[in-house]
Image (cartoon, grey):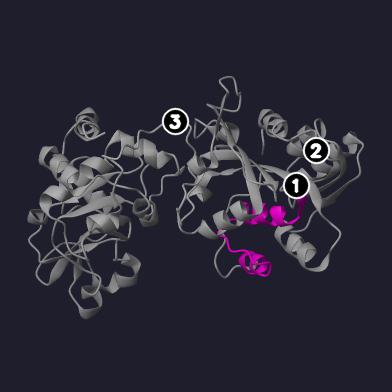
Amino acid sequence: MTPYRIAEFMSSLFDIRHAAGSLLDAGAGVGSLTIAASKVLNITSIEAWEIDPVMRHYLSKNLDELGMEYRVHCTDFIEQAVNMLQFSSGTRFMYAVMNPPYKKINSDSRQRLLVRQVGLETVNLYTAFLALAILLMEPQGQLVVIIPRSFCNGPYYKPFRQFMLRECAMDHIHVFGSRSKAFEEDAVLQENVILKLTRGAAQGSVVLSFSLDMQFADLQRTKCGFDEIVQPGDREMFIHIPTHKVQTSPGLFSHTLSQLGLEVCTGPVVDFRLKEWFSHAPGEGTVPLLYPHHFRGDDFLYPREHKKPNALKRSSEVNKWLMPNGYYVLVKRFSAKEERRRVVAYVHDPDRLKSSFVGFENHWNIYHVRKEGLDEITSRGLACFLNSSILDSYFRLFSGHTQVNATDLRNIRYPGPDQLKEMGRQYRHGLAQEEIDSIVTRFQ
């Protein structure tokens, strides 16, 4: 459900000098977005999709009061949009305003198969709705949508980013400062953004705006070049939202991982596939299996009483997923909402475990050198940099959720090897955030 104050703000982003035309609203609810848009746009007709019968009843009543030509569809928007694209040459829209549903779609689901029929590949309903709406727009048609920020980074949304940026100019991005206040009545915790797009337009500068919540009392606006949003040469096409300036000085953001001779991967052990080899306690013939819950704050607790195993029994099936015991930097793939930083890094010290090999569970990202450990000083310097406030600020420019992907970490630039070693000589577990930041900012 879209609060009406947000609907009003979204409608204010349209270019009201634009031509008259029809409006699309997919996932229309009771019609808040369409009602707001009708007050500022020259709309000739409305087509709205809503599958919930209760909301559809109120939607029809609200659209009646507008006195405009309209149709309310009770069918699945994805299916109908695909049919329109494949079999109808007449129906196109000048405007779209949407708050689409948020839900993952499986690779073998009906929705996923449908969107593939029109050349789209995506993993969530909200990106499927937006992509189909884009394809249904007239040239120079305008779209304003409120969606989760998760599409901005990560490998799964890359095809959608490529499609959206190829088909549209990005005109405006609005960011909410609070994760919970934009939809507080519905307890929606996604970090949302509002996008204004124009189909087939030349890309120019982008307007950025910011407010803490849906009251927009502290609304701020600025403009930036598109190369600040999508950095030139970025093959992943991450979308940065620079609502704050981050000093990415050469001393701190100068090297790629490959230039450092480092790699990062997700933890190789997918535990449910190895259930028959679980061992609650370490012992003879087992190898340690490390989860994020073995690290709490600055403490390493192993073994730990937990529903998950502490070890795996050695076997040919288990051995192929193990890594030699050594110094590794571990980053949690899923940070808790209450944690201060998005990126939370630990140094795995091999002396803590009396084992030649170790299993890292799949909820880790692991920095390594050709599947083996780093030297101790570099590992500590890398953890220091990853745990710094400046890295956290930089990471938040393109990541609006608590998941940290290996692709995200590959896309970052890092201090050079000498700088990392110098940080490593000063870093130790237990340092306060201010002390970590003091070490790192000396290299700006």
Identified by mark 1, the residue type is Gln
User: Which residues lie in the magenta part?
Assistant: 111-140
> Judging from the image, what secondary structure is the residue with disc 1 in?
strand
The stretch drawn in magenta includes residue 127? yes
Mark 1 Cα-neighbour bin, 10 Å: few <14, some 14–19, many ≥20: some
Observer able to see residue 127: no
Mark 2 is on which residue type?
His
| Label 1 or label 2, whichever comes before in sequence order | 2
Relative to 318, is 213 above or below?
A: above
On whether residue 423 falls in the magenta region, the answer is: no
Residue 37 locus on image (x, y percent): 77, 35
Residue at image mark 3: 244
Q: Amino acid at mark 3?
A: His
**Residue matched to label 2:** 18
Q: Is residue 141 left or right of residue 70?
A: left
Callout 3 crowding tier (Cα within 10 Å): few <14, some 14–19, many ≥20: few
Badge 3 or badge 2: first in the primary sequence:
2
Q: Pointer 1: what residue?
A: 140
Instruction: Let me know if residue 433 appears in the view.
Output: yes
Quadrant of the rendering where the C terminus is positioned: top left
Tell me the quadrant of the picture where the N terminus can be found.
Answer: top right
Which comes before the other along the chain, label 3 or label 1? 1
**Residue at point 59%, 37% (across, down):** 206
